[in-house]
């Protein structure tokens, strides 16, 4: 052992890991205080566009029921929802649902038209 008494400015004298001087208060108080969760940082999550949801629902129902009465509103709502989502600047979400409703509504319209064409052809050939 040496007679050297390390002072506070000695670079070889390191405090133990995690040691905080007892006379210094923490520089930042804990967020939220005791018993409260820390505050939520960042922007709020984007809200779901209702027209996009209804477009997808009507597109699915129009495809299952093979009904153009549900396909047309699905297409219209899908177009309107995509325009609103694009204009919202990230505040609204649901572009995938709007696109799905748009595509499913179009498929239901095409399916209905093909079905009617075959029915018409069957009626014409039956006579």
Image: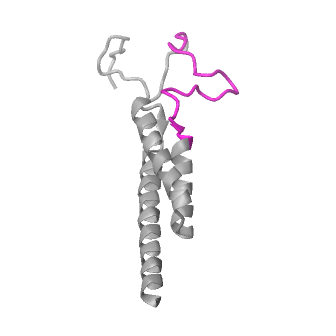
Q: Is residue 75 magenta?
A: no
Q: Would you say 1 lies left or right of 120 here?
A: left
Residue 41 against residue 79 in the figure, above or below: above
Q: Which residues are magenta?
A: 23-50
Residue drawn at (47%, 44%), measured in percent from left and top? 94
Q: Would you say 74 lies left or right of 86 here?
A: right
Of 19 and 84, nearer the camera is: 84
Specify the quadrant that holds the N terminus: top left
Residue drawn at (35%, 21%), measured in percent from left and top? 13
User: Is residue 46 at all visible to an observer of this figure?
Assistant: yes
Q: How is the image coloured?
A: one colour
Q: Would you say 40 lies left or right of 9 here?
A: right
Residue 16 against residue 113 in the figure, above or below: above
- In this view, the residue farthest toward the right is 35
Of 125 and 22, nearer the camera is: 125
Residue 42 placed where, x, y %? 48, 27
Residue 28 against residue 105 in the figure, above or below: above
User: Is residue 60 at all visible to an observer of this figure?
Assistant: no
Q: Is residue 49 magenta?
A: yes
Residue 119 placed where, x, y %? 47, 79
Residue drawn at (43%, 53%), measured in percent from left and top? 102
Residue drawn at (50%, 58%), measured in percent from left and top? 71
């Amino acid at each position: 052992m040496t007679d050297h008494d390390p002072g506070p400015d000695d670079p070889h004298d390191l405090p133990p890991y995690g040691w905080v001087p007892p006379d210094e208060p923490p520089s930042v108080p804990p967020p939220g205080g005791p018993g409260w969760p820390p505050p939520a940082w960042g922007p709020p999550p984007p809200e779901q566009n209702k027209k996009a949801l209804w477009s997808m629902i009507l597109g699915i129902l129009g495809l299952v029921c093979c009904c153009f009465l549900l396909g047309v509103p699905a297409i219209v709502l899908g177009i309107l929802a995509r325009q609103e989502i694009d204009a919202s600047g990230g505040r609204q979400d649901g572009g995938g649902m709007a696109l799905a409703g748009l595509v499913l509504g179009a498929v239901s319209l095409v399916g209905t038209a093909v079905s009617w064409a075959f029915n018409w052809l069957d009626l014409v050939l039956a006579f």
